[in-house]
Image: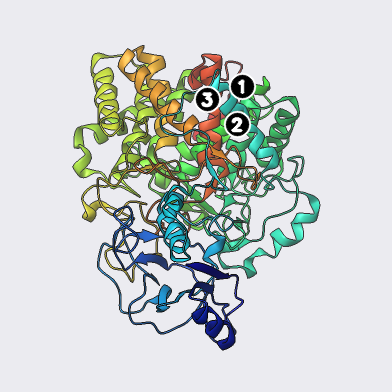
């Protein structure tokens, strides 16, 4: 038996089919989506509907073709369908009534696809391993021998190492260097010619648009990162925000891990975000003086998330220490104090405050309020900074309020916490403040708190070193998993569907656990904690992106990694930041920076020993 492939939309004619039947050919053909009969893929995924692919790809398995459009046909029993479905790698709530055939047997001689499945590598179909049975089935349909079962290919974007591959010498130093180099080739560092698109990006949905060409020198800052959508060329769009946190964190990573040229770009980014950008609230007569908005757009610069402000400050501390400069120190202390004076008397600030409410009520209203917010994701890094600033300035209220809040959170227990995208991220966020609490007040109780929190985090550490995601009681979650197929892709969610899914999250958990374990190991010298940090470091180095075809991704980290199948995969239900998203600050910057700190055998606590701000800011901002 011989076969005929008709690829990329060159639909067969009746004459071709007659010839194929006469010659006993088996035909595989791909339809071209024609105007009026096209399905644009957005949140839909592929569902297996047959046993034809063998045990490795059973019915109800979920796959992805990204945003590839398909032709619409009516087919009674497709082998593969496209539908909006919830689930990690298999259907969580069954097959919905609305579905679109993707691959089917048209007749005994003809196998038909509703789109160019032959682009499986270029378009980065996922998971790569799971598509191999589909490709083999098509090849076997055309008459290939059993040897087709050995068909292999290398994905266009893949992890730096296989799960069982031996790590090469100096693998951590190489990973840190590649992380810093990624910023230089990410195409996200703005140039003057990019500003027109940046200022006009509100015309795009959530300011997600085409990737800029080339990189700037940092003097105009850096964009937020890559959105998760994958187009037919394997490319991904970019999110056009200049976030305060991402800019400072990127400056830190470039400064700690980069070459001299990359460090210069990092300094430029730090100068932009700390001294020049519109995120700053510079007017000392304003109640919001010293705070930074989450990005520099007019409708966003008046929203102050505590965790974003904290990571902005931490980024500047890291950049200042790496560059041995004090020129951002006043801004660092000013922002710490601005957040502290809008933190209540029990040490809690709340998820976010707005410029309008602060200006209306005055900062003292918030400073004296009995606020309680059991949410380490939003509160924890500010507590860490208050402890750090206390050590640098001696201003005791900073320590007292942070310690009081930490004590309340620990004693209340996790059942009283609110989790954001999962309970693991809340635990991970507690590691830094608990480690730094031991730095300023080293008691048996505080060490016990830290040790217990570390134990909870590493209880979920897989043999690969990755930290498995977990969510808690859904009634206490802000962003739980979708509970219906229709809810998939409609809000912020975890990237697991059920507890136990083999997923590590580099946006919300593993990145911050890496920093937290590093600081915990540094202050306790506990070999168990050190080993957990080492194992996580090895995991992160293994899953770092490697790609010749897409240098704009090479050296970064996607949000999701399925350590069970060793691929970039998840439920991808999150409305804004799905499995294949890349965040300049939260993800790449922190992983790269901690790898660099490990090379220097340096705790972040000690990264900026020359901190030398104007201490008069304490009097100016807190005793008015």
Q: Earlier in the sequence, mark 1 or mark 2?
A: 2
- CA separation, marks 3 and 2? 10 Å
- Locate residue 300: give its quadrant: bottom right
Q: Which mark is residue 253?
A: 2
The answer to which of marks 3 and 2 sits earlier in the sequence is 2
Q: To which quarter of the image does residue 478 belong?
A: bottom left
Q: Looking at the picture, how far across and down is residue 561, in whole percent?
A: 42, 43
- The residue shown at (25%, 68%) is 94
- Label 3 Cα crowd, 10 Å radius (few <14 / some 14-19 / many 20+): many
Mark identifier at residue 595: 3
| Structural distance between the alpha carbons of marks 1 and 2 | 11 Å
Foreground label between 3 and 2: 3
> In the image, what residue occupies the spot 59% across and 56% down?
122
Secondary structure of residue under mark 1: helix
Which label's residue is closer to the chain start, 1 or 3? 1
Q: Which circle, 1 or 3, is nearer the viewer?
A: 3
Query: Relative to the observer, which residue lies in front, 485 or 240?
Result: 485
> Looking at the picture, how far across and down is residue 166, in whole percent?
46, 24
At x 67%, y 56%, the residue is: 211
Q: Is residue 604 above or below residue 135?
A: above
Q: Nearer the viewer, residue 583 or 80?
A: 80
Crowd tier of the residue under label 2, counting other residues whose Cα lies within 10 Å: few below 14, some 14–19, many 20 or above: many
- Residue 109: percent from left, percent from top: 44, 76
Task: Please rate how many residues cluster around mark 1, counting C-alpha atoms within 10 Å: few if below 14, some from 14 to 19, many from 20.
Answer: many
Find disc 1 in the rendering and name its residue.
321
Q: Measuring 51% from the left and 14% from the top, which residue is drawn there?
A: 601
């Amino acid at each position: 038996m011989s076969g005929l492939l008709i690829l990329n939309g060159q639909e067969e004619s009746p004459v071709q089919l007659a010839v194929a039947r006469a010659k006993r050919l088996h035909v595989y053909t791909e339809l071209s989506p024609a105007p009026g009969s096209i399905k644009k893929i957005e949140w839909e995924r592929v569902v297996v509907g047959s046993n034809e692919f063998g045990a490795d790809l059973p019915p109800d398995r979920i796959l992805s073709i990204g945003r590839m459009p398909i032709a619409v046909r009516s087919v009674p029993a497709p082998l593969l369908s496209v539908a909006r479905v919830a689930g990690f790698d298999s259907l969580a709530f069954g097959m919905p009534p609305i579905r679109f055939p993707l691959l089917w047997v048209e007749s005994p001689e003809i196998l038909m696809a509703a789109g160019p499945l032959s682009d499986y590598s270029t378009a980065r179909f996922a998971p790569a391993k799971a598509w191999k049975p589909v490709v083999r089935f098509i090849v076997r349909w055309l008459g290939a021998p059993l040897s087709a079962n050995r068909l292999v290919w290398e994905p266009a974007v893949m992890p730096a190492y296989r799960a069982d591959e031996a790590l090469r010498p100096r693998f951590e130093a190489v990973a840190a260097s590649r992380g810093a180099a990624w910023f230089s080739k990410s195409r996200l560092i703005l140039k003057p010619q990019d500003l027109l698109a940046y200022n006009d990006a509100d015309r795009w949905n959530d300011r997600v648009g085409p990737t800029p060409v080339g990189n700037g020198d940092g003097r105009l800052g850096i964009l937020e990162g890559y959105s998760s959508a994958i187009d037919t060329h394997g490319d991904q769009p970019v999110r056009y925000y200049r976030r305060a946190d991402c800019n400072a964190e990127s400056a830190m990573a470039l400064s700690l891990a980069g070459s001299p040229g990359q460090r210069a770009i990092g300094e430029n980014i730090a100068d932009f975000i700390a001294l020049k950008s519109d995120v700053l609230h510079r007017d000392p007569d304003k109640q919001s003086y010293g705070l930074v908005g989450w990005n520099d757009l007019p409708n966003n610069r008046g929203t102050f998330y505590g965790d974003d402000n904290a990571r902005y400050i931490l980024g500047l501390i890291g950049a200042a220490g790496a560059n041995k400069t004090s020129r951002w120190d006043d801004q660092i202390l000013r922002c710490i104090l601005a957040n502290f004076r809008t933190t209540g008397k029990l040490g809690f600030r709340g998820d976010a405050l707005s410029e309008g409410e602060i200006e209306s009520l005055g900062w003292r209203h918030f400073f004296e309020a009995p606020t309680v917010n059991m949410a380490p994701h939003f509160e924890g890094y500010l507590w860490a900074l208050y402890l750090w600033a206390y050590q640098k300035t001696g201003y005791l209220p900073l320590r007292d309020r942070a310690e009081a809040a930490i004590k309340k959170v620990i004693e209340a227990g996790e059942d009283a916490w609110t989790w954001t995208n999962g309970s693991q991220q809340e635990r991970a966020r507690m590691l830094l403040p608990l480690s730094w609490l031991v730095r300023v007040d080293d008691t048996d109780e505080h060490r016990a708190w830290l040790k217990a929190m570390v134990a909870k985090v590493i209880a979920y550490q897989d043999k690969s070193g990755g930290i498995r995601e977990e969510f808690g009681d859904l009634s206490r979650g802000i962003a739980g998993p979708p509970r219906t197929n229709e809810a998939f892709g409609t809000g912020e969610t975890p990237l697991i569907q059920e507890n136990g899914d083999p997923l590590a999250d580099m946006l919300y958990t593993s990145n911050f656990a890496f920093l937290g374990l590093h600081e915990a190991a540094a202050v306790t010298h506990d070999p168990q904690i050190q080993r957990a940090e080492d194992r996580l470091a090895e995991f992160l180095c293994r899953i770092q992106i490697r790609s010749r075809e897409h240098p704009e991704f090479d050296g970064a980290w996607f949000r999701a990694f399925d350590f069970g199948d060793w691929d970039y995969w998840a439920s991808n239900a999150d409305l804004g930041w799905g499995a294949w998203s890349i965040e300049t600050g939260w993800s790449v910057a922190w992983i790269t920076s901690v790898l660099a700190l490990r090379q220097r055998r340096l705790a972040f606590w000690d990264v900026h020993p020359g901190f030398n701000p104007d201490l008069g800011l304490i009097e100016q901002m807190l005793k008015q």
